[in-house]
Amino acid sequence: MTNYLVLHGLGGSTNGHWQEWLTNELRAKGENVWFPQLPEWDHPVKAEWLSCLDDTMRLIPEDDQLVVVTHSLGCILWIHYAAQRFARKVSRAIMVCPPSNDLDKVEIQNFFPLPADKNVLQMIAAETLLIASTNDPFLSRDKIQQYFDYQIPCLILPEQGHVNVQSGYGVWPWMLGLCLRDTLSSPFCVHKGV
């Protein structure tokens, strides 16, 4: 059995967002999906989001595989979770469009700085894939390098914005297919940070 955990970012991922669509599609296929609605979407507090994530992780059966799908600030939350001593290991993690660690956006400042240990993403999941876009307003092309330091495969999408509703990502069949695979390995080219 495979379980899925979907972590939204600032402002939530409802109203046609691909994470909401993905959750509904996975559930329609009979999959177990956790899509916690983290507190205070528009004014998040890292400690509160981490507490909610910890509570959710305790609800998910430990004997089954777990695939984590994060977007935006949810990616940053996942990095903080991974850095905790008691963090639960997962099968696969897909991280889409994390914001820059020096983004000038007051609502997310309490989520930074990121943990110093750049090995946490390799340790928390058997496989992790980070997906970024060349024209993401929250992670400019020249800032993507900061995530190569985590030594995980990165898929860079050309000109796809923040990969959200505004950039046309409501229905996203490719992501559904990726979630249902047994591995994140794929014929697409990825850059592995060095």
Image (tube, rainbow, N blue to C red):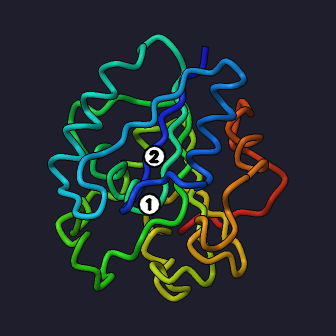
The residue depicted at 50 percent of the width and 39 percent of the height is 68
- Circles 1 and 2: CB distance less than 8 Å? yes
The N terminus - image quarter: top right
What's the residue type where badge 1 is placed?
Tyr
> Which three-letter amino acid code belongs to the residue tagged 2?
Gln
> Which residue occupies the foreground of this view, 180 or 155?
180
Report the side of 127 relative to 114 (left or right): right
* Outermost residue to the bottom: 142
Name which of mark 1 and mark 2 comes first in the sequence. Answer: 2
> In this view of the protein, which residue sits in the foreground, 80 or 14?
14
Closer to the camera in the image, 48 or 40: 40
Give residue 162's quadrant in the image: bottom right
**Circle 2 sits on which residue?**
122
Placement of 79 over or under 90, stated as above or below: below
Q: Residues within 10 Å of mark 1 (few under 14, many from 20)?
A: some
Q: Residue at x 39, y 76 (%)?
A: 100
Residue 75: x, y in percent?
42, 56
Secondary structure of the residue carrying numbered label 2:
helix
Which secondary structure, mark 1? loop
Of 11 and 1, nearer the camera is 11
User: Could you tell me which residue is drawn at 84 percent across and 53 percent down?
Assistant: 187
Q: Residue at x 28, y 56 (%)?
A: 117
Total number of numbered discs in the rendering: 2
From the viewer's perspective, is 132 left or right of 117?
Answer: right
Horizontal side of 56 relative to 62 (left or right) equals left
Q: Which mark is residue 186?
A: none
Q: Is residue 17 left or right of residue 175?
A: left
Q: Which residue is mark 1?
A: 150
Q: Classify mark 2: residues with Cα within 10 Å, few (<14), some (14-19) or many (20+).
A: some
Q: Where in the figure is residue 106, as x and y percent of width and height? A: 22, 78
